[in-house]
Amino acid sequence: MPSVQDVGGKAAALSRLESLGFAPPKFFLIHADSLSELVNGAELTAKLKAIGPGPYAVRSSAVGEDSAQASYAGQFETRLNVSRENVLIAAQNVSASGPGAALYEKARFSEAHTARVHVIVQQMLVPECSGIAFSADPVTGDRTSVVVSAVQGLGDRLVSGEVDGETWTLKHDGTVVSAPELAVLSEGQAREVAALAKRVESAFGEPQDIEWAIEDGRLHILQARPITTPLRPVPNEDQTLLIFDNSNIVESYPGLVSPLTYSFAKYVYARVYRAFVGLLGVPEDQIAENAGVFDNMLGRIDGRVYYNLGNWYRALALLPGFSINRTHMESMMGVSEPLPDELTASIGPAQVTGARKVREMLRVSAVTLQIIGQAVLLPRTRRRFYERLDKALGRGTDLDQANLNELAQEYRVIEAHLLDRWDAPLVNDFLCMIAFGASRSLLKRWLGDEGLKLHNDVMIGQGDIVSAEPPRLIEQIGRMVREAGISAALREQGLDALGDFPKIRNEVDAYIDRFGDRCAEELKLESRSLREDPTPLLTAIAARAERSERVDAEFAKPDWGVFFKGRPFRRLAARALTNWAKLRVRDRENLRYERTRIFGHARRVFLAMGREFHALGKIEEQRDIFFLTVPEILGAIEGSSLSPDLAKQVRLRKAKQTDFAERPDPGERVTMRGSYSAAQSWTAGSPEEVTGDLQRGTGCSTGKVTALARVIRDPRREALAAGEVLVAKHTDPGWIAVFANASAIVVERGSPLSHSAIVARELGIPCVVGLKQATTWIQTGERIEVDGEFGTIRKCDG
């Protein structure tokens, strides 16, 4: 292999490319010492014949040229499309251009030491396109990116700087980061060039700047040289598996979520689940050791909120009993697909046997007694929680007149008295999960499918679930609007239509006063509540007014004796457990409404802060507050801020949010390697294609309805006509105004304990949850049959 000292940088690189199998166009070298010997032409003719017919490229190859220290770009002549007859003259001109590099060397190295210039003669290509590629980004120094520049035809104008060409940026796995709008290269060709650059880097052992060309659809390498600009260090390898999943949390935080909501939710989850594992017997020192787990229960990917499943699993592994039955405990996570063994095998204690198993069972027994005690004391715990809640929310602070420090103090009260003392919802949710699952399983085991129907029937019509009040009030106000004949005016004019109808206006105002925080996506602080925009409520009332009077569902009490004839002890046990589960479901839903009140109050506090920051000129408008985080806001008020320029931070995040909105939804489960910031790409589960005229989900509320379907993705902008079947990806308590007009509900996500299922049972309308791809399989306007008992959906038009 010829050395750089013998033949110069370019010729040494071409020889190396050739020896490594990269097959650059054929070439030969004219050594500086032998240029004069070629004047007779015989030797030159033989060399040209060996590399094939012209035209030819004639270029320099000097010692130091195209090295890691200096490129000598543009310091030596290059002649292209040289005919056989003119090769010698071109070679002489190129060789004579060497002294012109002296000034470059003096500027680069403070002294000139140019060696003699050797000459390369290489067969020319006639490419459709050509260009250069850097196996690392020479501008940012990023070693994980490849930059490809391309022009049509020959690339000499690109190399010389006459034209810019088009630029692609790709990651090493081929992911396109940026691409031109009108492309010379196809995406596949750009990936092929990037892959070639990486192969050359691997072969040469350092990042490379290559020249390439595509002729007749085939990619050729023309030259390679080290990148001379400084690059960032090579990061240490990190193959840590990260898994994010939103199959449950999407009901609370659908779609894009603001930085403020995310930071608030992150704090809430950290505090609440620290308290949860404490209630289940995990020692305080162990909780403290795992602070990082609880502080990172959530992740934010492309502006969407996900569970960090690795940390949820780590928190679960702290619980007593995990080492006895890992499989059962894993099922408590409730995700749609299991975690891979690679993740679970490295987390938590292994399955125990012998004496260690006995000790763990004793620990579980102690916790079981503690849970029983919590169940006995639940009425007192719940009463004290309501007292704290009413006291914290009833402080009488005038948010319209409060200054920033007073508003910060109001928020601190929410943290200290409510978020850090979330005992009643935690205890009740845990007991509800156990009671609901146990009673449902017991009835299925003893009665089969009839047991599941009985379970649904028992859960219907409790009459004291707060979430069922809004549809009844909408029904009542809708009746008044129908009698007044103003439904059309209500749609068109909003509250102005009620000017001559004070009784109706009073009813609407009373509804908003009580349920004004119950809006679509109500846990997202940036959502506009009914207090800000009552349009969704008025639309629901108008739709209800235009529908014929609905007869309230009458719920027949199940005859337990029929199901358990001759088995009184089973009847007693099943009835007691199921009725207790019914009470826990009721309390769960009612306590969730109190969560809505807390989040609603926090929303008003933050909006008041936004008003004050805007008045001080710190942000451009009031609602810009949602693009800041809780620590940033409090830091700007209380003096711990590290970034005083709030407006700049807002502008950056608004731009990022716009970028997130233009990207496709990452999907239900996202898997990546390494740290989140270093992950070059991620994989998302592909949804299964759903076909046919009959599908089955989970039946949650008995009854059968045949009606037109309407797919609703955003209840703030879309309305349900009275009597239609609501079809949605997911719902939350704020959809209640939509539920009021539904004849049945079909939801892609959810469980028998989800809000949509609970409210549907209370309203006595069929409900099916967990129907995969419902919003793509069912089209608006299709007539479908919904069987809430068996969970089946049948298309009637096919």
Image (cartoon, rainbow, N blue to C red):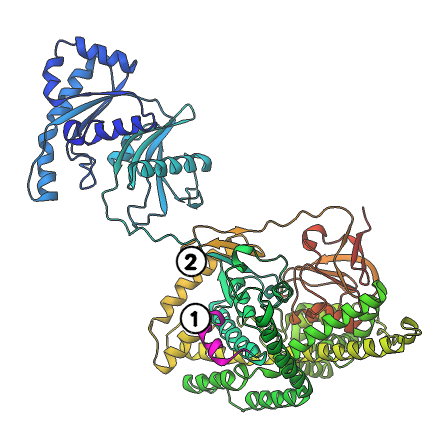
Q: At 36% across and 66% down in the image, what residue appears?
A: 648
| Label 1: element kind | loop
Which residue extends farthest front? 354
Residue bearing mark 2:
675
| Label 2: element kind | loop
The percent coordinates of residue 121 (x first, y second) are 22, 21
The percent coordinates of residue 380 (x first, y second) are 66, 90
Q: Is residue 229 left or right of residue 558?
A: left
Where residue 579 sits, quadrant-wise, is bottom right
- Nearer the observer, disc 1 or disc 2? 2
Q: Nearer the viewer, residue 576 or 703?
A: 576
Q: Nearer the viewer, residue 459 or 275?
A: 275
Quadrant (top left/top right/bottom left/bottom right) for the N terminus: top left
The tag earlier along the polypeptide, 1 or 2, is 1
Where residue 28 sits, quadrant-wise, is top left
In the rendered image, residue 483 lying in the magenta stretch gets the answer no
Where is 375 relative to 45, above or below? below
Where is 716 relative to 477, above or below? above
Residue bearing mark 1:
628
In the rendered image, residue 285 lying in the magenta stretch gets the answer yes
Disc 1 and disc 2: Cα gap in Å?
24 Å
Where is 366 relative to 242, above or below? below
The boundaries of the magenta stretch are 282-294
Count of labels in the image: 2
How crowded is the residue under tag 1: few (<14 C-alpha within 10 Å), some, or many (20+)?
Answer: many
The percent coordinates of residue 157 (x first, y second) are 28, 32
Contact, mark 1 vs mark 2 (Cβ under 8 Å): no
Q: What's the amino acid at mark 2? A: Ser
